[in-house]
């Protein structure tokens, strides 16, 4: 009796908590390259914390520990990494805006997490495919209640210019980022493609990858110096009431976060580095400003933060995958990545607001109120 009511209450409370918005940070360490044994600079890791050793020849000797919402070690599978992300995917169908992004130095595993390795199998597929696959599955389960429309855009931000990666013509056209309040599209001129299956998504991603390679030379791997963003727009029509719910998810593979040696970088390379530096620090500034509840949040300081504006802050849910290269010679970047992540993860952004409060949330709140009343009577 009483115990069950109490338990039920707790479960519902957790579900509502789960729908609240803040920034989650998951840290992922990739395996050491080659046949190297051991764990490199990673001294210890468990589900929620990671400890890095800094041997004296790489600077001050010592250990540094960091805690995050989750930590995934070198042997974590793509499926494991995705499994904690699933509740976010579901919330897109409930009308929330979601942003999932991959941060880390070049070679740390960002693309591996988001897309997967070159050879894609059901096991190796990354977050992008799994997220869309989940959207299709859940929308199928809800088909008697909602009619969902799922469409995607894929863009690249390179040197503060926005390009359409799904363009079939006029590839180099520069795109504008607009306020999305009207249409729900904040890059209205980028090709918007309706998708209904994972194979649709694979075809589009292949096109995107091909377009991304255009303009990069062998010497200049552009993909590590640009941000790429797969945006999924979901529109659900409530079949009974006709009400329309709109959710949006940005899946962002960020440019490499490594600092560039100013004495070495010149010309184009220096310009790229400055743009990346500017946009990643703009991202940090936006998050810090949200944390301090400043009335002015500097979204306009970079194309990246303009693009993600609706998905960063009190109305949205954000997940950052932070990637670590375990090699000793990456220790400097590893520490600066972990410090950035720590700053980001200490942020509590308050309750996320669905674009329209869903029946589900309303129902849960009502049930909690009823259970509380029942408990009060018992006392
Ligand atoms: P980034 O996009 O951050 O530059 P990549 O995702 O391209 O890095 O990863 C660099 C290399 O390491 C690739 O060859 C990739 O396949 C491999 N790699 C990255 N993460 C993992 C992992 N978790 N397990 C196995 N291999 C990985
Ligand atoms: Mg990459």
Image (tube, grey):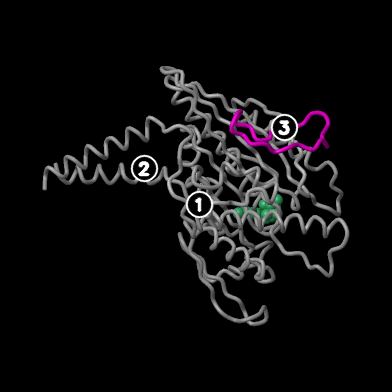
Q: Nearer the viewer, residue 302 or 51?
A: 302
Q: Nearer the viewer, residue 81 or 282?
A: 282
Residue 243 in the image: x percent, y percent? 46, 22
The crowding category of the residue bearing disc 2, from other C-alpha atoms within 10 Å (few below 14, some 14 to 19, many at least 20), is some
Q: Which residue is mark 3?
A: 190
Q: Residue at x 21, y 42 (%)?
A: 372
Secondary structure category for the residue under label 2:
helix
Residue 222 in the image: x percent, y percent? 79, 49
**Would you say the residues marked 2 and 3 are in contact, meaning their CB atoms lie under 8 Å apart?**
no
Q: Residue at x 58, y 64 (%)?
A: 338
Residue 218 in the image: x percent, y percent? 86, 51
Secondary structure category for the residue under label 1:
strand
**Would you say the residues marked 1 and 3 are in contact, meaning their CB atoms lie under 8 Å apart?**
no
> What segment is highlighted magenta in the picture?
167-187
Q: Residue at x 11, y 44 (%)?
A: 378
- Of marks 1 and 3, which one's residue comes earlier in the chain? 1
Q: Nearer the viewer, residue 295 or 360?
A: 295
Q: Is residue 178 magenta?
A: yes
Q: Which residue is mark 1?
A: 23
Residue 198 in the image: x percent, y percent? 60, 31
Secondary structure category for the residue under label 3:
loop
Please give the label number shown on residue 16.
2
Q: Is residue 70 magenta?
A: no
Q: Nearer the viewer, residue 235 or 165?
A: 235
- Of marks 1 and 2, which one's residue comes earlier in the chain? 2
Please give the label number shown on residue 367.
none
Q: Which SS type dominates the magenta stretch?
A: loop
Distance in Å between CA atoms under marks 1 and 3: 28 Å
Quarter of the figure with the N terminus: top left
């Amino acid at each position: 009796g009483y115990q069950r009511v109490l338990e039920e209450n707790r479960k519902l409370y957790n579900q509502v908590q789960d729908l609240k918005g803040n920034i989650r940070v998951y840290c992922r360490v990739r395996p050491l390259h080659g046949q190297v044994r051991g764990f490199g600079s990673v001294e210890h890791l468990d589900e929620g914390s990671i400890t890095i050793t800094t041997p004296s020849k790489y600077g001050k000797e010592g250990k540094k520990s960091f805690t995050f919402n989750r930590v995934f070690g070198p042997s974590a599978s793509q499926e494991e990494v995705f499994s904690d992300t699933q509740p976010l995917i579901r919330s897109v169908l409930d009308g929330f805006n979601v942003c999932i992004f991959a941060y880390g130095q070049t070679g740390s595993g960002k693309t591996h997490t988001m897309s997967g390795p070159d050879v894609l199998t059901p096991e190796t597929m990354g977050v992008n495919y799994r997220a869309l696959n989940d959207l299709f599955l859940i929308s199928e389960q809800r088909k008697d209640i909602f009619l969902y429309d799922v469409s995607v855009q894929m863009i690249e931000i390179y040197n503060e210019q926005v390009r359409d990666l799904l363009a079939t013509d006029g590839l180099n056209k520069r795109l504008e980022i607009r306020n999305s309040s009207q249409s729900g599209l904040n890059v209205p001129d980028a090709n918007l493609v309706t998708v209904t299956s994972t194979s649709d998504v694979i075809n589009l991603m292949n096109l995107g990858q091909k377009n991304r390679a255009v303009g990069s030379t062998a010497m200049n791997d552009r993909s590590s110096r640009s941000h790429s963003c797969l945006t999924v727009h979901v529109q659900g029509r409530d079949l009974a009431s006709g009400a329309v719910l709109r959710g949006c998810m940005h899946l962002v593979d960020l440019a490499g976060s490594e600092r560039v040696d100013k004495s070495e970088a010149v010309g184009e390379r220096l310009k790229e580095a400055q743009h990346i530096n500017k946009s990643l620090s703009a991202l940090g500034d936006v998050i810090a400003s949200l944390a301090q509840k400043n009335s002015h949040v500097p979204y306009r300081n970079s194309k990246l933060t303009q693009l993600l504006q609706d998905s960063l802050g009190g109305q949205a849910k954000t997940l950052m995958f932070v990637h670590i290269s375990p090699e000793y010679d990456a220790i400097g970047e590893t520490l600066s990545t972990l410090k950035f992540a720590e700053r980001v993860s200490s942020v509590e952004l308050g309750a996320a607001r669905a674009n329209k409060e869903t029946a589900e949330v309303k129902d849960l709140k009502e049930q909690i109120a009823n259970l509380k009343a029942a408990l009060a009577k018992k006392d």
